[in-house]
Image: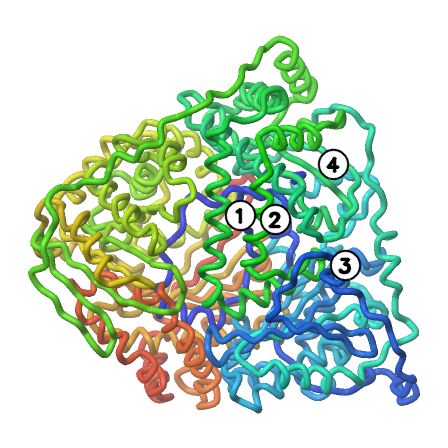
Amino acid sequence: MISPSVEPAPVREEGHDEEQQAVVNTHKEKEPNAGNSSRNKKILLASALLVCVGVIVGVLAARPWQSNDQAAVESQNVTPVPWPHENSDIQPDPRVTYGSLKNGLRYMVMENSEPPNQLMLRMHVDAGSYQEEEDQLGLAHFLEHMAFNGLRNFDADELIPEMQRLGIAFGAHANAATSFDETYYELDLPNSADKKAMDLVFNVMRDYADGILLEEKEIEKERGVILSELTVRDSVDYRMTKKLWSFLLPGHRLPLRWPGGDPDVIATAPRQRFVDFYEKYYTPERITLIVCGDADPEEMEKRIIETYEDMTPNDKKSNMDDDIDLLGSVTTGTGFKAAVFSDEELVNERVFITFSRPYEVPLDTESERASQFPLMLAHSMLSRRLQIAAKKEGSPFRSGSASGGGRTDILARSGIESGTISVTLDSSDELNWKASIPIIEQELRRVLLFGFAPFELAEVKANYMSFYQQKVLADPTRSSKSFATSLRKTIKDQTVFTSPEEDLRIFTNAMESIALDDIHVAFKRFWDTSDLKLVLFAKEAEPETETIMEQIYAESLSQTEVHPPPMEVDTTFLYTSFGEQGVIVSDTTHTDLDIRQLQLGNNIRVNLKKTDFQANTIGIAAQFGTGRVSQDPSKPGIQWLASQMMNSGGLGKHSNDDLQRINAGKNVGVNFSVKEGCFALSGATTPDDLELQMQLMAANIIDPGFRDEALQLWKQSASSYDTMFKSQLDGAKFSVEEYLRGNDTRFSVPSLEEMNALTIADVQDWLGPQLADSYLEVSLVGDFDMESTISHILNTFGALPEREKSPQVVDDDLRSIQFPDTPGEQTFTYESKLPAASSIVAWDVPHTEKDVVPERRLNLLASILRDRMRKQIREEIGESYSPRASTEISEEFVYGVLKAESPGTSDVSESIGLQIIDIAKNLSTDMVEDELVRAREPILATIEQTVRSNNYWLNSVMLQSQAKPWKLDWARNMKEDYASITLAELRELAALYMKPGNAIRMEIHPISANDEE
């Protein structure tokens, strides 16, 4: 709560469809999840979390370097840490088995059959960077890496290959993370019926606990990988947050123990300091094992006992009761004060008020949970007010939120209670912070004086009630991965793991007695502090800025009167009738795929597939028009403004804010996107809300709002986008994509002037005709009743005016993309003091039209290239944390690329790029069958899960499947085709496309803003 949320980047590339993702996911390092942007503290955790991947095997009671005498230490009966439900009146989820061993190790086991035949293992260690001493800064995270670099019974070079042969992918199925107060390891077993794989993952988890070798040579090799990871993860937002926490928490350990650590310690720490941390904190009483998935709970409990019962406590272990003493104190009594933190590379400037005070996490009881709801509702209502204020003409900020309280984040777990009211500034004027401060002050004071209106409470209560109700309905098909994550979070949050029925009961009971006055009282109590801090994050600031901030706040407080909020608003939805009900003129069912395809009398096509993958959930998509292929080359960036206008402009008769209020408690929503060959409207809903969802989507077709407030938001953000393009590594990658597409302006990075020159009329000229009558397909997949669903479709889309019978034929010259001449080299730069650089190599490969067979083989070839890069660049020379390779193959443009990237620093960019070219060159001659097996088996295992995904069927199979019927055949043969791929085919492709003479080698470097390119 101390820091404002970090907004997402303004655009996101289309990326991979679900079939491609089945391949990509098998070799993708996980990035920490930023979470809900309205929850400020969770964003900070995303910056702090450090992730790596790997696999190990081996079991032995003593640590590898301990003598037999140490191994024979007599077993001790250790009192385990109590479970939260043991001191609570809340009913724990009865599906979970809880247990502990004599050595103090605890475990949770939960049987769950979605997805079938898969099992998730998690090992949680109650220790992180907080436990580090001054000469160990960064070693908690470093130690987590070392768990993937050699165990007692497996040489480091053989660990990952053995896992891959069993279908366990490096990255997708094996992972780990370190935070301030915890470290956890994750292993996902794609086939729980495979005894060999089952034995392996349990042995791996045991060796994580006490079987890490910590060999000198492996530590030395990994130092460069860790330093590379710190470089990759460094950012302006991360640095600003570190400054902020140091300012707000001067007496606390939190600002002093970032999980990344100290580069000097990482570069020089002797082996013994690793051993010291491992022996002191990786002890049975600090470990909790979680097993969740499609396996017999009794058998899993037996395996846990057999695997861990001989793990002995040791005399070097720490006392867990001492952990709280490490944290230091939270300073209070400092009074109101302004602070400015500036950085010219900052993308999103913010101003916010915040406070922090000591906090002790209470027991998780029903009364405690109920006591949190009034404040939760209050902050939700204040956030809505700020969002509405952001859309007013001339608003100095473009978004806002309020948050605070709660127990489930690193601040609360660290003995800190905090609150924040924050706005993200309109970037078009560097002085907008001056106009924003009075608004923050007055909105806070308005709530303190008058509270909230009944209609505001009705809206947020409806939304929360719907949230809890939908959790109940969706629970039967909730995934084991999701359950495992939730179980793990209860460990440090000290919360009872409850069923959705119990959550709904607690919330419903609380809502029966909570009134506006209760919410008002809770808000006033929470914000009753004299220690408010007024903070500005800015690109630059004058020395007297802090004084000016304090003066503006004081003048607003003393001179501006605030008034109560309005008491009621109209909430009638005005799009319920679209004309005479449509008719079906063609009805075909593909029985092998269970897909039903309709053609309506107005030429709209409909694709329907009932599934049981996600209970009470329906995915919907409507595709129309030509998309990016028809974009005006003279208007770069218009695809982003089009999305902004459609997603933020509301409807002709309702603004976006109106729609949020009207649809409170409903599971509906529409997202517009510009794809390569079409425009798309998409959403997810429930059977109860399907009719309203269809009405919303049809209304977006016939009457989009194109409101000025959406254009205002675009212009408010343009300067931030421009800063991102110029001063971030990821921003420079947009220029790489433009270059690889022959500098086609449809893919170019628009200048600030070009962004500001775009108008609503430009978007209407592009979208208007295609919204009116272009070819349109609607696809639905999920848990729906066929008869009522078709009725809803006929009353909405079926009632629209007649549309084109077939997609518009796009000229070949619009589909053509000119790949750069090969071989070639190109350097890109961005203006930054951050050291992050990147080496990229790209090879021109065929695009996909009707035949997906070559693309699948190229995907597999990219997986093998990536694995060789991991071995040679990461493990052997330690120059990059996350080398990777993937394909980007278009169905609409004549464009395909196989691309390899290795993030690092500028001093090694050239040599790494040349090494990637050399690695790729050798694939045609020395690729072996074992590499094919190790790349293919994880993909085949992932496909099993992919075909049980609504997203796969909706976006990869059914998307425009009547215009492109061959996509159905792609679904029919995906697994069999991947299984049939041969080594000879891959060698042939490598020889054809991955020769040095076909490669484009690129480098991205940071430069000073004053340097010449």
Q: Residue at x 60, y 62 (%)?
A: 486
Label 4 to label 3: alpha-carbon separation: 28 Å
Residue 264 as seen in the image, left or right of residue 477: right
Label 1 to label 3: alpha-carbon separation: 30 Å
Q: Callout 1 environment at 10 Å: few (<14), some (14 to 19), or many (20+)?
A: few
Q: Name the spot of residue 999 as percent of width and height, x first.
A: 38, 67
In the rendered image of this protein, does residue 827 appear above or below residue 110? above
Q: Name the spot of residue 724 as percent of width and height, x first.
A: 48, 42
Q: Quadrant of residue 656?
A: top left
Q: Name the spot of residue 221 as percent of width and height, x first.
A: 69, 72
Residue 690 as seen in the image, left or right of residue 249: left
Residue 124 as seen in the image, left or right of residue 94: right
Q: Amino acid at mark 2?
A: Lys
First in sequence: mark 2 or mark 1?
A: 1
**Dot 2: what SS?**
helix
In the rendered image of this protein, does residue 205 appear above or below residue 460? below
Residue that badge 1 annotates: 36
